[in-house]
Image (cartoon, rainbow, N blue to C red):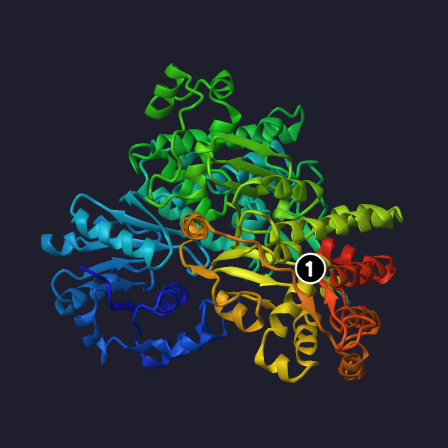
């Protein structure tokens, strides 16, 4: 059965998210709730959502709405009915009775529950109905989280499960992992356990919340929220309910019980309304004293709050061996947490899944971990692990591995999908090259460059790798969440603080040289961006010959926000794209003014649909729903362009002073309306100088190198100002822009 029509019942956060994502995939969907007004309001929330749940907001009315009393007939035409109502079994049973009376033969029915087993959900269903019933556990927000757990049991029609998996993978772009019916399924079972271990060990070792979060975060390849920050984000009271559910469902022999015991401080926080970010605060709180806001952290022993301290663990990269071998409390904590996570995850094989690496992928896709538990074990080293661990009786996975001590136990990654993913091919590379900032994977007929820095920020080494890898057709692609957040500003500020502006100028020149080299390389260059593709990351992408973009891209030139202008060719390429329009052919000022507006405001697009009108992406650029498919599509682009010839260098005719008068009028109004302040005007004037072509006139021809020089001069003038440096430092410290 092909899935051509879907009904979602329940328009809360998850139901709305599922309906929105079906709309993204151009699948006809109807969203039902108790009253039509409720589902209509849900549709309004979808339309207004930030970050946006829809790739294309103009398609909002493709989500039909209705109520379960008057409009339930739509179920008769549905190929898939998704239940996403409140987590009350009596209500779910009532809905299922109604669905199965109305559905057509063979239609799939699923629940989005995160905690209730199939055996409980389906206890009133007939044997025939049970064949078509499963759990489809989407992660929130549905558009952005890659993981979908399809939970089955012995009653299911496996052909039907596989059909659903294929649909969710191909059409919805999900990492669809099939697992058995056990509490918490894959992701939450391991993820919640990991959180609890990190918390209980922090209490046991008397670490502060800041220390625990600093270790159980980026150094482990885990999102920077850490454990206590994540507890606050989810809701401390909600986590308490989750733990109760696990305790109820799991056998007493399960190691989860050891880390799920009630903690008096947690109980007190809930009782006093400190339930996390949604309440008065939690393990962290924002304390307002007059006009001043101070982030405070709780003392785990006393329960008192004090100003939060930044903990420098001197580890920007995921290096587990170094981390666990530290001769301090941080190393002890890291080892204790990691070893317990590995032991627990491995104890679930084969009970939950026969493929241990499914657990790794669930943690990657559902919790944004850089490495899953078994990849952690692989990095630590099997012999090293067993030299320190000997209590694994009853854990068949570890018992078998302890006998073989096979360091190459991992094998193929991402077995859950047939797609040729980056994760799979990396291990098959004929050789590995590169440096600390970027890896070069070499194959017979092409190369791959993967950035490896924090947020994939670009530096000298990144540029070196890109230039070195153009000896063959090249694909620039990453497994991490971001393509690149831009040039490494921390690195830049180290020179600025020393007044070493010559070194900054040298780097920007090298960046320009590298981007030009990519564009005019003998062999084609494909960029395959996903996530943040900003500033310098955008400039790498836009000067590649071809682009295969994930639909969840966030793309733009945002340099003005930190008091700079794009200087790696971003101004140049945006001018070229807007000059190549019918409007620009009629009006010589048109292109400069359009780009001035886009770059001046630091506008970003959150999807290819938003990116195209701004010309961040071209209509010819490939747009892909499934992130796993980026490599396959990129390879096909290379295959289809074997006769590639580098493009001809661009030439520019720009109006110079003739357009700057219009730009000055725009700036005067913005300044008078206090939308921008003194330094904002200074930044914008430098941008205007570049986009107008400097001291040119419309009858003169400028080369790409001329525009590069204008970009460089403007960049250097701004980076030497104290106010730009203040903006950069403020953004690096707070993550927020400074208006000065």
Q: Name which residue lies at 60% across and 47% down.
A: 224
Locate residue 69 relative to residue 582 in the image: left or right: left
Q: How many marks?
A: 1
Task: Please rate how many residues cluster around mark 1, counting C-alpha atoms within 10 Å: few if below 14, some from 14 to 19, many from 20.
Answer: many
Q: Nearer the viewer, residue 386 or 556?
A: 556
User: Can you say which quadrant of the picture contains the C terminus?
Assistant: bottom right
Q: Nearer the viewer, residue 659 or 671?
A: 659
Residue that mark 1 sits on? 569
- The secondary element bearing badge 1 is classed as loop
Give how far across and how far down residue 608 sits, in percent: 49, 65
Give how far across and how far down residue 487 sits, in percent: 69, 51
User: Can you say which quadrant of the picture contains the N terminus?
Assistant: bottom left
Q: Name which residue lies at 73% across and 57% down.
A: 731
Seen in the picture, residue 667 relative to 351 is either above or below; the reply is: below
Give how far across and how far down residue 198 sits, in percent: 53, 38
Locate residue 652 relative to residue 375 in the image: left or right: right
Q: Would residue 303 be seen by someone viewing this image from the given angle?
A: yes
Give how far across and how far down residue 614 sits, in percent: 58, 72
Based on the displayed image, in which of its 4 quarters is residue 658 positioned? bottom right
User: Furthest residue to the right?
Assistant: 499
Q: Would residue 341 be seen by someone viewing this image from the given angle?
A: no
Seen in the picture, residue 453 relative to 707 is either above or below; the reply is: above
Locate residue 75 relative to residue 35 in the image: left or right: left
Q: Nearer the viewer, residue 342 or 274?
A: 342
Seen in the picture, residue 50 relative to 218 is either above or below; the reply is: below
Q: Nearer the viewer, residue 554 or 228?
A: 554
Seen in the picture, residue 731 relative to 30 is either above or below; the reply is: above
């Amino acid at each position: 059965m092909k899935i051509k029509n879907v009904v979602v019942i329940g328009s809360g956060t998850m139901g709305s998210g599922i309906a929105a994502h079906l709309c993204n995939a151009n699948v006809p969907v109807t969203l039902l709730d108790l009253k039509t007004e409720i589902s209509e309001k849900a549709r309004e929330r979808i339309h207004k959502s930030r970050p946006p749940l829809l790739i294309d907001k103009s398609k909002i009315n493709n989500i039909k709405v209705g109520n379960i009393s008057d409009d339930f007939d739509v179920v008769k035409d549905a190929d898939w009915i998704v239940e996403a109502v409140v987590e009350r079994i009596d209500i779910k049973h009532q809905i299922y009775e109604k669905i199965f009376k109305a559905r057509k033969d063979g239609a799939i029915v699923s629940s989005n529950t995160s905690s209730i087993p199939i055996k409980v959900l389906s206890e009133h269903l007939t044997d025939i109905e049970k064949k078509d019933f499963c759990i489809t556990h989407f992660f929130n927000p549905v558009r952005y989280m890659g993981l979908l757990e399809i939970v089955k049991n012995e009653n299911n029609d496996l052909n039907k499960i596989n059909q659903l998996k294929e649909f969710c993978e191909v059409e919805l772009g999900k990492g669809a992992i099939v697992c058995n019916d056990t509490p918490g399924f894959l992701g939450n079972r391991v993820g919640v356990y990991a959180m609890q271990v990190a918390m209980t060990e922090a209490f046991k070792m008397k670490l502060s919340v800041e220390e625990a979060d600093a270790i159980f975060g980026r150094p482990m390849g885990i999102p920077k929220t850490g454990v206590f920050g994540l507890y606050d984000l989810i809701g401390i009271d909600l986590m308490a309910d989750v733990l109760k559910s696990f305790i109820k469902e799991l056998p007493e022999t399960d190691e989860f019980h050891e880390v799920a015991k009630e903690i008096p401080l947690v109980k007190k926080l809930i009782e006093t309304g400190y339930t996390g970010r949604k309440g008065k605060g939690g393990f962290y709180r924002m304390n307002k004293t007059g006009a001043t806001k101070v982030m405070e952290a709780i003392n785990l022993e006393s329960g008192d709050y004090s100003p939060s301290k930044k903990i420098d663990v001197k580890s920007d990269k995921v290096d587990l061996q170094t981390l666990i071998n530290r001769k301090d409390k941080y190393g002890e904590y890291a080892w204790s947490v990691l070893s317990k996570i590995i032991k627990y995850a491995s104890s679930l094989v084969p009970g939950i899944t026969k493929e241990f690496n499914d657990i790794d992928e669930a943690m990657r896709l559902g919790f944004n971990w850089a490495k899953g538990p078994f990849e952690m074990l692989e990095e630590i080293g099997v012999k090293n692990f067993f030299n320190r661990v000997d209590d694994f009786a009853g854990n068949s996975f570890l018992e078998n591995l302890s006998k073989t001590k096979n360091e190459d136990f991992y094998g193929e990654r991402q077995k859950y999908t047939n797609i040729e993913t980056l994760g799979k091919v990396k291990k098959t590379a004929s050789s590995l090259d590169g440096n600390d900032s970027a890896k070069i994977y070499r194959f017979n007929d092409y190369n791959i460059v993967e950035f490896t820095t924090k947020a994939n920020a670009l530096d000298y080494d990144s540029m070196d790798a890109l230039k070195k890898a153009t000896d063959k057709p090249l694909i620039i692609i990453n497994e991490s969440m971001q393509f690149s957040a831009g040039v490494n500003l921390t690195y830049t500020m180290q020179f600025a603080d020393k007044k070493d502006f010559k070194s900054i100028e040298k780097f920007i020149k090298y960046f320009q040289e590298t981007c030009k080299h990519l564009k005019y390389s003998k062999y084609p260059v494909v960029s395959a961006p996903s996530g943040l593709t900003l500033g310098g990351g955008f400039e790498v992408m836009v000067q590649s010959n071809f682009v295969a973009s994930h639909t969840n891209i966030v793309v733009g030139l945002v340099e003005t926000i930190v008091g700079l202008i794009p200087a790696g060719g971003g101004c140049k390429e945006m001018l070229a794209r807007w000059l190549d329009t019918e409007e620009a052919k009629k009006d010589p000022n048109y292109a400069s003014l359009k780009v001035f507006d886009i770059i001046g405001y630091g506008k970003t697009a959150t999807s290819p649909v938003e990116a195209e009108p701004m010309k961040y992406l071209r209509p010819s650029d490939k747009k892909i729903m499934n992130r796993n498919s980026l490599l396959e599509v990129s390879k096909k682009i290379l295959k289809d362009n074997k006769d590639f010839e580098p493009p001809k260098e661009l030439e520019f005719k720009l109006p110079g002073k003739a357009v700057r008068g219009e730009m000055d009028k725009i700036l005067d109004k913005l300044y008078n309306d206090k939308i921008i302040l003194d330094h904002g005007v200074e930044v914008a004037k430098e941008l205007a100088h570049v986009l107008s072509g400097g001291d040119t006139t419309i009858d003169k021809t400028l080369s790409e190198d001329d525009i590069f020089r204008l970009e460089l001069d403007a960049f250097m003038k701004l980076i030497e100002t104290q106010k730009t440096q203040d903006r950069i430092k403020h953004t690096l410290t707070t993550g927020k822009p400074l208006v000065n």
